Amino acid sequence: MFEMAQDYVRFSRTEFEIVGGYLSPVSDAYKKAGLVSAEHRLRMCEIAVETSDWIMVDSFECVQKEYTPTAQVLDHADYELNVIRGGVVTKDGERKRVRICLLAGADLLETMTTPGVWSPQDLDHILGRYGSMIVERAGSDVQNALSSLTQWTDNIFVIPQLIQNDISSTKLRLFLKRDMSVQYLTPPAVVDYISRNRLYGDDSSTAAASSSIRGKEKEESGKTDVGASH
């Protein structure tokens, strides 16, 4: 998804330049069936980006004891990059503010049109203040979702999926539970970590304790952050 966003920015004549991307795994307070502990998920994310020179991992959300809404995670990234670090320095030596943007799949965009899943205040904060880059996914109706989010259309950037792919983290977990290979679906080093730690098997001790998801918690599935500058 990150690389697709990078290509979209480079080849679609946008006004942005991506300067960094952050994976933000949810904490254990997000009670979703099938999730292993935050410690393992954080480590897998770190392993997955070891070979990248621009994608990183932010542990802020992952280590929180309480559930952290997406809007607050974006606020955290904005504060760290623009207040603490003072933005980014361009090749000309000019310091610029970084624009934070939520990178997500089209299925997440669809949840934004489902009553009771997102609060109106959070939607306006996320899509109005920060904006979102949405990657098309097979089976998702992006245009229908956008028709219900017209007030933020100018802040939602749809990234076309040039090669159809409906692989998701949910499907990967299902494959692993069935002892099927995911060797070519996720980085080999992550596959090795999963195998060594015996994750995602039939052992229920690796799963979250509760399978119930409160309405607003559904917003947390598969979110990532992208930092871009004008």
Image: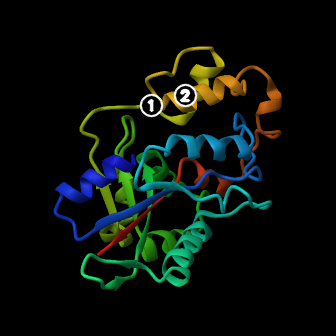
Q: Residue at x 76, y 38 (%)?
A: 211
Image quadrant containing the C terminus: bottom left
Report the colour scheme.
rainbow
Q: Position of residue 189 (x, y in %)?
A: 54, 31
Residue 93 position, x and y percent, is: 29, 83
Examine the rendered structure and indicate whether residue 35 appears above or below residue 120.
above
Judge by depth and name the residue closer to the eye, 214 or 85. 85
Q: Position of residue 133 (x, y in %)?
A: 37, 58
Q: Is residue 172 left or right of residue 20?
A: right
The kind of residue on which mark 2 rests is: Leu
Left or right placement of residue 116 versus residue 205 in this view: left
Q: Amino acid at mark 1?
A: Ile
Residue topped by disc 1: 167
Secondary structure of residue under mark 2:
helix
Residues packed near mark 2 inside 10 Å, few (<14), some (14 to 19) or many (20 plus):
some
Q: Is residue 81 above or below residue 113?
A: below
Q: Is residue 120 visible from the viewing direction of this image?
A: no
Q: Do the residues bearing badges 1 and 2 touch, measured as CB atoms within 8 Å?
A: yes
Q: Residue at x 33, y 53 (%)?
A: 5
Nearest to the observer: residue 174 or residue 1: 1
**Labels 1 and 2: the sequence-earlier one:** 1
Camera-side residue of 190 and 112 = 190
